[in-house]
């Protein structure tokens, strides 16, 4: 219901400010359209059988065990979607342990996943990074037995949430928005690929690239966010040293 007060408030908005907002939005749109698409030039390691997926997960687990510090991986899932029945079962798991390597596990025909995968995702050294990542690992645990969703959630670094500390926004970050804001690039969300039949083996080259880019971008964003946090911490420390009287008031 529109009240007289709300109508007065709307009419009180400066016409010049409206014009400036419109110009700014147009400029942002123009800048966005000129930006290049993010690309992945690394290796796609694509596996479709339980044995091959188990071997790949063992490799990841061994890397985590050997790591002397946190082992960060870009992570994403793909599943088919039907407008009548809704989201299907997880079909593809993407894991990027480095910026030039992506494991693509096609698990659509498996009833149970390798134990080494759950051990890896629940490993105390592993950090699983992505956007809305906690819901992804919860879905994985719902779709397949043998996963401890609570442990996986503890290992999650949600880029969409953590980015707000250094890159404030009034809304929620999607992967697309983060790539635009932080990397100054676009991510190709071609509907034909995004809504494709992810459960059908084998994946096309276009599907593999699409899947790899999401995991790759997630890992790259993690590094950029961490870098921004370090810069912010240094700047905040310098500001505190310049104004010690502020610290005394806070304490």
Image (spheres, rainbow, N blue to C red):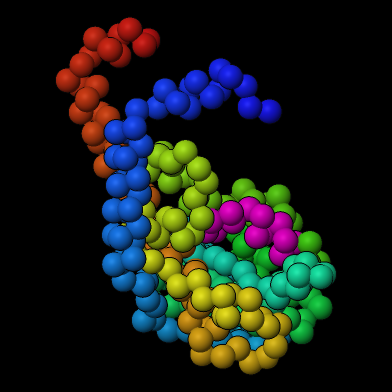
With 185 as the anchor, is 103 left or right in this view?
right
With 126 as the anchor, is 33 left or right in this view?
left
Instruction: Please state the extent of the stretch shown in magenta in the rendering.
Output: 127-141
Locate residue 140, reporting x and y percent: 71, 64
Locate residue 175, reporting x and y percent: 49, 59
Classify the position of the N terminus by image quarter: top right
Classify the position of the C terminus by image quarter: top left
- Residue at x 58% of width, y 19% of height: 4
- Residue at x 26% of width, y 42% of height: 231
Question: Is 148 included in the stretch rendered in magenta?
Answer: no
Frontmost residue, 58 versus 172: 172
Residue projecting furthest to the top? 249
Frontmost residue, 93 versus 84: 84
Locate residue 197, reporting x and y percent: 68, 83
- Residue at x 42% of width, y 23% of height: 12
Q: Main secondary structure of the magenta part?
A: helix
How many marks can you see?
A: 0
- Residue 50's place in the image compared with 94, above or below, is below
With 233 as the anchor, is 2 left or right in this view?
right
On the image, which quarter does residue 186 sit in? bottom left
On the image, which quarter does residue 240 sit in? top left
Confirm whether residue 237 shows in the render.
yes
Question: Is 138 included in the stretch rendered in magenta?
Answer: yes
Locate residue 84, reporting x and y percent: 81, 70
Confirm whether residue 146 shows in the render.
no
Frontmost residue, 85 versus 178: 85
- Residue 35's place in the image compared with 236, above or below, is below
- Residue at x 57% of width, y 67% of height: 76
């Amino acid at each position: 219901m529109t009240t007289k007060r709300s109508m007065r408030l709307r009419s009180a908005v400066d016409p010049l400010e409206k014009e400036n907002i419109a110009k700014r939005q147009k400029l942002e749109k123009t800048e966005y359209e000129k930006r290049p698409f993010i690309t992945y030039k690394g290796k796609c390691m694509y596996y479709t059988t339980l044995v091959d997926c188990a071997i790949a997960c063992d490799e990841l687990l061994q890397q985590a065990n050997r790591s002397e510090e946190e082992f960060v991986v870009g992570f994403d899932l793909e599943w088919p979607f039907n407008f009548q029945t809704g989201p299907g079962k997880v079909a593809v798991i993407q894991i990027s342990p480095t910026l030039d390597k992506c494991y693509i596990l096609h698990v659509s025909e498996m009833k149970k996943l390798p134990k080494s995968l759950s051990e890896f995702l629940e490993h105390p050294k592993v950090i699983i990074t992505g956007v809305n990542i906690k819901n992804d690992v919860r879905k994985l645990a719902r779709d397949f037995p043998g996963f401890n969703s609570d442990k996986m959630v503890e290992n999650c670094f949600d880029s969409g949430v953590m980015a707000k500390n250094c890159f404030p926004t009034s809304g929620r970050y999607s992967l697309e928005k983060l790539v635009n804001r932080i990397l100054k690039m676009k991510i190709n969300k071609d509907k034909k690929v995004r809504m494709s039949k992810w459960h059908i083996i084998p994946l096309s080259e276009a599907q593999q690239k699409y899947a790899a880019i999401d995991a790759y971008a997630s890992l790259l964003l993690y590094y950029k966010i961490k870098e921004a946090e370090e810069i912010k911490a240094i700047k905040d420390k310098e500001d505190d040293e310049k104004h010690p009287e502020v610290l005394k008031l806070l304490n």
